[in-house]
Every structure is written in structure tokens, then in C-alpha cells.
Amino acid sequence: MPEDMSYSKMSHQLLQQLPKGAFLTVKAGDKVNTMTIGWGSIGFIWGRPIFMVMVRYSRYTHELIQEAEDFTVSVPLQTNMKKSLAAAGSKTGRGIDKFAACNLSTRSARKVKSPVIDGCELFYECRMVYKQAMECKNLDPSIQSRWYKDGDEHVLYFGEIVACYQQN
């Protein structure tokens, strides 16, 4: 049975795994997509626990998350999902069944419409509270030259964490 917990209880494990990859999953209407994320943050903003994720304009997930009310972040902690993370980060869901191509399955989230990824151990369910397009002119030039040479910037999505739980 999944264990409910405070959003901050497993923050150390989340922040250790995030650079290795986690799954951002979004449902808009009848369309669902997941992608690998390696960047994000959790914290306390506006009196709420918040998970901030970044999605580039060029990604299919961007099309969906712009319309979505929520998103989930599924974090593999013990399971070796390296191949699925690599595939979900390199394939697009625009023209293929990305879940089949990445050997992934979903299950319903507890409090949001977007599903979570089966096989992961840590889940954050988030209700969208704010979206902000990046403005590279405000970014440190060394970061801009390294990550945004081609102009494919991110949009920052802030989700209130409405559920956090661990599946063993």
C-alpha cells in the first residue's frame, strides 16, 4: 500500500535522482504524454508546497501541459528504469505510442487527472498554479550560452503538490 507523506520527507532522494531522470506526465483532454526531466525544484511558495518543472517549447509535452490543469512527477528510486528514462527523453509522443515505445505503463493518480508511471517508487501530484515563459535576456550569460544557444527556451510550470506518496 502506498505511504502518504509530506512533500519534503523524500526531498533529498528526489534531488539525488532528478539529475539522473524522473518522469513528468501530463494529461490534457484524452491525450497523455510523459517525458524525462532532469531539472526541477521543490519548495514552499505562496504558502503552498510547490514543484516547479521546465518544458521546452519544442517538446510535445509543452503542447499538452499548456492546456492541462495538473501534472505528475514519478521518480524511480530503486528500480532500474535507465532505458525507459533514456527512451522517454529521446522519443516524441507526437506520432507514436510513447508508452509502448518506452516500455512504460501508467496508473491513475490519486488526486489529479494526469496519471503516474508504474514501476516508480516516489510520486508527486501537482495542480497547476502558475506558468511563466523564460526570458533569456534576464539569464546569466554563461547559462544562456551553454543551454540556450539555439533559442529553444523553457516555460516554467509551478504546481501545488496536492499528494506525495511512496510505493515500495
Image (cartoon, rainbow, N blue to C red):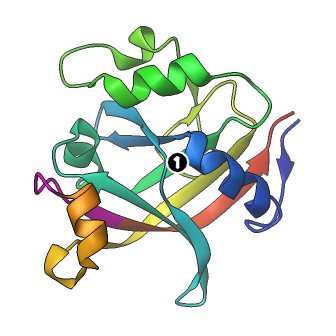
What residue span does the magenta drawing correspond to? 149-156
Residue 37's spot in the image, x, y percent?
A: 46, 45
Q: Which residue is mark 1?
A: 72
Image quadrant occupied by the C terminus: top right
Mark 1 nearby-residue class (10 Å; few <14, some 14–19, many ≥20): many
- Amino acid type at image mark 1: Thr
Q: Is residue 121 left or right of residue 131?
A: right
Describe residue 109's horizontal placement relative to residue 78 as left or right. Answer: left
Residue 29 in picture, x, y percent from top left: 28, 39
* Viewer can see residue 3: yes
- Residue 147 versus residue 133 in the image, above or below: above
16 and 34: which is toward the camera: 16
> What x and y, as percent, mark residue 166?
80, 45
The residue shown at (21%, 63%) is 145
**x, y percent for residue 41:** 55, 66
Q: Nearer the viewer, residue 55 or 4?
A: 55
Q: Where, by quadrant of the figure, is residue 107 drawn?
A: top right
Is 160 one of the magenta-colored residues? Answer: no
Element on which disc 1 rests: strand
Of all residues, the one furthest to the bottom in this rendering is: 47
